[in-house]
Amino acid sequence: MAEKEVNPDENTIYVGNKPPMSYVLAVVTQFNGGSEEVIIKARGRAISRAVDTAEITRNRFVPNARIKEIKIGTESITNEEGRNSNVSSIEIALTTKK
Amino acid sequence: MAEKEVNPDENTIYVGNKPPMSYVLAVVTQFNGGSEEVIIKARGRAISRAVDTAEITRNRFVPNARIKEIKIGTESITNEEGRNSNVSSIEIALTTKK
């Protein structure tokens, strides 16, 4: 392979309810494994933790990582009673490319 | 005045711990009052509510508003015991300009 392919799933970290450092470690591991871009995704209340994850990664562990793009959106999810509700989502793309 | 001046403070909505609809109302009121740009700011756990505010505004009340820019950052705050701690922040700029 001449060029490294970007597998979006492989470079995506889904942020949930664990402490932020769990996700920071996952992001740092991706970068250290040779990824030039990592996408941090979260929904609902985990959105603030996704921002923490990006900021801690940049400020403490991967200083040459910069924010490439931030997207927000709304996703429709079906809850346990079968009803649809909307939840906000975020995608933060970090890159070490110049 | 030939051009309307943008006063950043006037067009900024700070999102805190109230229900999201309080802030949506504030943003919609700004747009209805003639503002072409509204900045939604939040820190810490209120970040997810800021995203909710932007999304509900766009999807339900101001369909011609689009996201102009999203910035994230880290602020240092001093707590009650006088110690510094870092908190993540977000700024979402919504605009109705073409």
Image (cartoon, coloured by chain):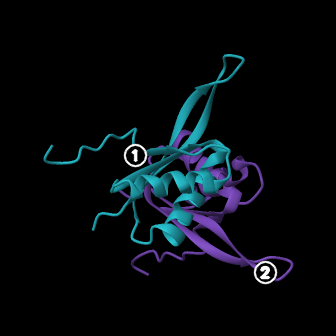
Chain colours: A cyan, B purple
Q: Position of residue B3 (x, y in %)?
A: 40, 76
Tag 2 secondary structure: loop
Can you identify the residue that label 2 sits on? B83
- Which amino acid does the dot numbered 2 rest on? Arg
In front of the other: B46 or B12:
B46
Q: Residue furthest left?
A: A2
Name the chain letter of the residue that bears numbered label 2: B
Is label 1 on the same chain as label 2? no
Q: Is residue B68 left or right of residue B88?
A: left
Horizontal relation, residue A62 to residue A95: left or right: right
- Of badges 1 and 2, nearer the viewer stands 1
The x, y position of residue A96, in whole percent, is 34, 63
Tell me: residue B19, above or below residue B33: above
Residue at 55 percent of width and 57 percent of height: A24
Is residue B19 positioned above or below B76 on the image?
above
Instruction: Say which quadrant the C terminus of chain A sits in.
Output: bottom left
Q: Quadrant of residue A43?
A: top right
